Structures are given as C-alpha cells and as structure tokens.
Image (cartoon, rainbow, N blue to C red):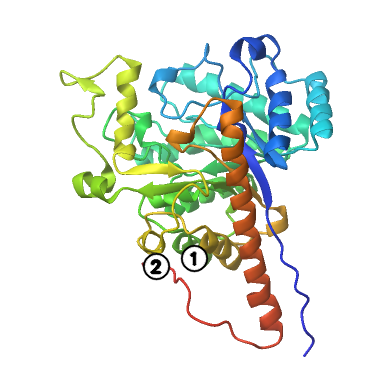
Amino acid sequence: MRPAEFRPRPMRLSILTAALQELTARARRDADPDLAIEEWLGFAAEIGAPNIELSAALHPSESDVPAAAMLDPVANTLDLRAPFDAGRAARVRHAMQASKVGLSDLAYFDNMLAADEAVRSRKHQLMLRVFDAAVLLGADAVTGFVGRNPQLSMDGNLVMFEAVFVPLLKEAKARGLTFRVEQCPMPGWSVSDSWHNNIAYAPGPWIALHRICERHGVGDQFRIHYDPSHAILMGQDSRSVFQYLKDSGYNFLIGGFHVKGQVIEPRGVAAWGYGGQTMQRGDWHGGQPSPDPAAQLNAWKKQTVFSEHELPGTARHDPLAYLQNRSVDWLDHQLAARELLAIDPEKTYLVVEHEYPPARIQDRERLKPILAGSLAFTRAIDEAAAAMYALQHEVLAAQGIGIQGIGREPYRS
C-alpha cells in the first residue's frame, strides 16, 4: 500500500475593510476617493492580512438608512459616487503591488429587494458599478445580500427575487462574476416584528433561490458566502448546515466564508427566546414607529438582547457552548468545511469580519494589535484543521488506518 504524502492545504486569509471604517478621515477620502483603498492596503500589510475584501456602500450623503439607525455602520472604502474607471483601477493595482496585499472579492451589503422602486434602483445601480470595479481589479466574485421586501410574504419575495434579482445575476454572468450571498437574517433592518429581512438566511431558502436561478441560466452565478455567526444566531451549527447541504446535493453552494462568531447570552434567551425582544424596545413611540433614526437602532434588540458578535479569537474557549450551539467551534467549523463541502481549500477565502462591539475602535493604533491577533488566530486554527484533515482523511486513509474517536456529529448537540 503506497503511503500518501502529508500535504495540508490551508485556506486563503482576507479581511473586510469595514473592520475600520474611519481609517482614512472622511474629509480626506471624499476629496480623493481612492486614498482610502491605498491606506487600507498599507494597514492590511501591517496587521498581517494577505488580502482584503473591499467594502463598497452608498455614500452617507446618498444612503436611505441614516448612520444613527445602523447597528454596524458600513464602509464605502470603495467610493463609487463616480464610476470606477481604468485610471482608478491602475492606481489601486499599483498600491496592491506596493503593499503585496491582494484582493479576495468586493462586497456591498444592502437590500436588493427594497420595496421603494426608486431606492431599489439606486442600490442596483451601485451594485452594477461594484460589478464593473470587480472586473477592472481582477476579482471574480462580489459578496452581498439578497434582502427582502417587508411588504410581501416570503413566497411573494421569491417572485420578486425572480423579477428583480435574477437580472442582477445576468449582469454578473456577462462580466464573468459570481455573486456570493451572505446569510444574515438582518432582524434590525425593520422596526416591525419581522425577523428574516434577508430571505437567503438558511439552506432551505438557498436551495429554493438557486432553483429559480437555474431556470434562468444563472445557477453558477449564485453562491453563498457563509458566516457561522448567523447560524449560531438562529440556533444552528455549521456541521449540521453543511451536512444538510451535502445530503440535499447542494454542498457546492458555499463559495467563501466570513470568519465571525456569535456568543449567545443564556439570560437573554431565557427572557425573550431566540426571537429576541418583541416589545418595548424603544423603536416605537405611542404605538407608531419612531421617526428618530437613533430610536430605530433599538430594532436590533431583536438580536442584541441575547447575542453579541465575536471577533475570532476574542471569546473564551468554551466546549460546553460549542456543544449547545452558543458559540462557534472554529476548529470543527474548518474541519466540517473540508469534510462536507465541495470546496478547494487552497482557492477558498476566509474573510475576517470585525463586529465585536467593545472592540470596534475607530483608532488605527489601538485596533491594529486586535486585528493582528484575530488574523493570527484565524490562520492558526485553519492550519490546524488543514493538518488534521490531511492526516486523517488522506494519510491514514491511504494506509487503511481508521480515525480514532467519534467527533462532533451533525444534527446532534
């Protein structure tokens, strides 16, 4: 029996530039839009990030959502008030070469199914500009949300997805791009009691949406950018999610990862359950939604009353929480991805996303060691998983030697 070579295959590390929205002061970057990208590339090199996920967003002067109503303000590191042309692309490419930092993908997280047609059109036009920028920068994927029209039922949103989102995927296909959908349910996007404000929130909806895409010839353009924090938020665990996809024949759907955790607060679950705070949040006054954007921020208590985002490496090692699906078991997450998903690890990006509230410091020097530590943790845990997988599933398997123990099993906690 010929022994197999031990060759662990780690994934590719990246970081979302929204981790530090104000790296470049607004006045400086508004006057020189690509300065923010240049400075973020330099910062990425300092913290040990070999790649960035470049964040785009509607400029604050154009956004339909006031900053005061955002739990986690987005970053328009990529400023697309003016189209991104070949000259701008050349400048950014030069900065990438100088910093030796690459580009995993571009990201624009917004509601592509917004009810107001004018608002939706503005968001779609920006998304098309993101697509064009991705092409000019040599990226092959854009990450974002599907969203939801809150005025429609979920089934009604499937019809709307076919009518207005599929055309976006056709534009992506024409440019040779993949659109990767993050699955956050976005409960705070609405002051109503609606929890799922992004219809692509779990494997069942992903499959339903992909079948619509297949009917229109854009199935290959629709993929998932999986974020385990959102699975924890909904009481799921990654191994079971991945197993379900494999059992259903859809384990090819996940094409990339956000590396962000979620720590569930048991007292909050005891008080409100996984639906979060349903009344007296402060986003309504006198039986009506408050017109005050700062008050609307309280809609996020549907989530924050029982959970808090984790920057990888900042939460305590807690095996009991892992077993109860109250925090992400990063080692098992990376093992399960290799064991159950149809991915090539060496071509798959792990994108660190920073949303841990106490550490969301808009100060370069204070945040630098925090992000450097999280990136180092993410790299190390993935390298450990890569080594375990190669040893167990390739080296031992090639010699007919069984793997010891049972390990974490899907559908069981």
Which residue is painted at 57% across and 54% down in the image?
253
Q: Is residue 174 left or right of residue 231?
A: right
x then y, percent, for residue 396: 67, 82
Q: Quadrant of the N terminus?
A: bottom right
Q: Amino acid at mark 1?
A: Gln
Q: Which residue is mark 2?
A: 411
Q: Is residue 175 above or below residue 393?
A: above
x then y, percent, for residue 360: 49, 31
Disc 1 is placed on an element classified as: helix
* Residue 345 position by quadrant: bottom right
Q: Quadrant of the C terminus?
A: bottom left
Q: Are marks 1 and 2 in contact (CB under 8 Å)?
A: yes
Task: Give the label on residue 243, or none.
Answer: 1
Q: Is residue 335 above or below residue 363?
A: below
Task: Give the label on residue 95, or none.
Answer: none
Q: Is residue 329 left or right of residue 326?
A: right
Disc 2 is placed on an element classified as: loop
Which residue is painted at 50% across and 38% down in the image?
162
